[in-house]
Image (cartoon, rainbow, N blue to C red):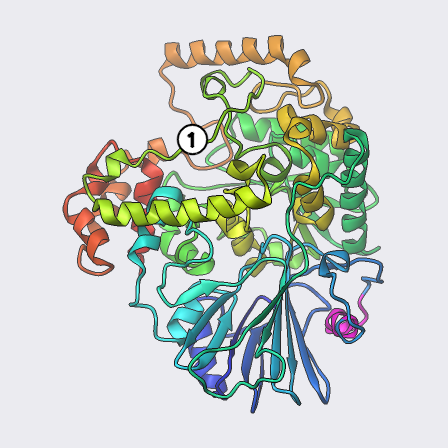
Amino acid sequence: MSDFIFTSKKDTKNNLVNSIEKYCLNKRDEVFFFNGVWGSLLLTKGWYYGYDPIETEQYICAVIGGPVLTGKNNNFENANSGSELVLGMWLQGVYKWDEVLSGPFIVIIVNKKSNQMYCITDLMMFLPVYSNKVNGDLALASHVDLIADYCNEIGNIDEVSSLDFIIHGCVTYPYTIYRNIKQLNPASVHAYPCPNSCLEKCSKICEDISVYWEPSENNIFPNIIDAAQYLREGIESYIRNIIKDNSNIAQFISAGEDSRALAGILPISHKRDAFIFLDKMNREGKIANKVANVFGLNFIYSYRSSTHYLDIISEASKLVGTGHQYTHAHSLRFDKINNLNSYDAVFGGLGSDTLLKLHFANKDKKRTKFPFLPQKLVSHEKCDYKNYEAYFSLEIIDLVKNRRDKHFHKLMRLRPNSAAEWMCIWPATMYIDIPNLYCNRRLFPSYEVFMCNASVKVASAAPTNWKINRQLFLRAFKPSLKTTKFMLHADGRLPYYSWKLNLPIHSSIWLYRKVKKKITNSNNNEGPWGEWNNVVKTSEWENNIYKVESNQFAFEIDNAVRQNILLDEKIPIISKVNLMQLYVK
């Protein structure tokens, strides 16, 4: 399934469809509808074969996403075979879901006889679930605007969450942009109602939450070699379970190392297409083409306009949901150009830097200026809110700080040595790049290999001194990188080698490029994504600023717009983009 909405009210199919088609449903898409005294459930058909919902005399079971069933045959014979196996495990009393399902997922089970509904989230909540509990009614959905629309909460904006999103690019867990809508727990079984209760109207919705996994710092590996082996074998197994003998597969490729690691694991027995989206054929594209040729991939590129990310703001925002950055919906529109939904599986490398390479750990700022230097961890640094104080009250800024501090202190209890890093990772709704997955999975059968359970568990267990400077990643995927051992990464280093061996190479290339750019005064975008410093100089950017109407969202946000926050050069560009997104209709 792609998306779902559940309500404890017995409602009509049309009412649910009216809400879901505004955000995540084309009118030609197939839907599945169930209702009874327990309530109503509507699901949209997804891209993952085997996971259509199944209904028995007593149960309904639906799976959102396309998880791998570990220890099971994933060659599903029927469109709902996977859901049938999941239901079977549930009936057998499975409670360690981290051992039986791998990858992003949501499982929904309805017991029609006992009027109980269960919702199971994945390890990191890569696929979020949102809840609304008002006046004794319960609603759950996989899209935040969908549930807000159905529950008449679209205009009930949480200003603290809005400012949080503008500044940080995400809404601090468990909040959302909407006051009465919250996120469910990651890695948990949510039972509605609690045992011996019922879904009758009451002043408070009962909820029983069983957490089946937490990302503790308990290191289960005796050494980095064992951790690297477990990681590689886990990802190889994940991929084997997805690819069938006749599978038509593709992957995203870049000039980086994650796509090389992936290309080295995908079976050479299959024809493999490799996609990249660029402003033009730049350094990134040329290196990616060479990498594709070495691995025997069919290199396919597409160009976007310089204002592409402004052009898709409305469509992409609707796809990923308010409070999630739309700018990560890189494949939107290119999915149709390249018929990505015609593949059985499209593989990506999202999450590798985040989970395995300390991307969000606090590192020495010298490395920001000189990227060839080794990573060095520093103490946790607070966000500087000074430039925002001219537009927002200290009261609302303090409320944002308090929410983030509360979540940080929870992580301090869970991960005292890496709370600052995991503040931006757990749950995955705190990970600002995660809308890339929200977009892709709704458009085609997307599989992010670094989000399999083996990767998540290694990321959780491995200490930072194993992950720093790519040590763990390099040990795990060096066999894949060997094929391109003398081929540069886009940033000027050789991914096959350690930072020590790369130091003279990386620093020399970095210096050469700096000098060349200064001499030629070039603003060319040599990377894979859009360059916002160039976008803000366009007339389209200016037009988007004037489209933002200052009386349509929330008081303090509207007031900041009236004070021309979008014209203030002290405010980061991405914060302005986030603000614009909030006003998209």
Q: Nearer the viewer, residue 411 or 546?
A: 411
Instruction: List the residue tagged with mark 1.
Output: 381
Image point (61%, 54%), residue name = 340
Query: Relative to the observer, which residue lies in front, 532 or 35?
Result: 35
Mark 1 neighbour density, 10 Å: few (under 14) some (14–19) many (20 or more): few
Q: Measured from the top left, where is residue 174 in percent x and y?
A: 46, 57
79 falls in the magenta region: yes
Q: Is residue 314 above or below residue 49?
A: above
Q: Is residue 183 left or right of residue 222?
A: left
Relative horizontal placement of residue 456, taking residue 23 as reference (left or right):
right
Q: Is residue 362 above or below residue 366?
A: below
Q: Residue at x 45, y 78 (%)?
A: 204
Which amino acid, by three-letter code, is at mark 1? Glu
Q: Determine which quarter of the picture holds residue 236.
A: top right
Q: Secondary structure at mark 1?
A: loop
Residue at the image point whose x is 61% and y is 82% from the top = 116
- Range of magenta residues: 76-89
Q: Main secondary structure of the magenta part?
A: helix
**Left or right: 368, with 552 as reference point:** right
Q: Estimate the x, y position of residue 394 in percent, counting from the top left.
A: 23, 44
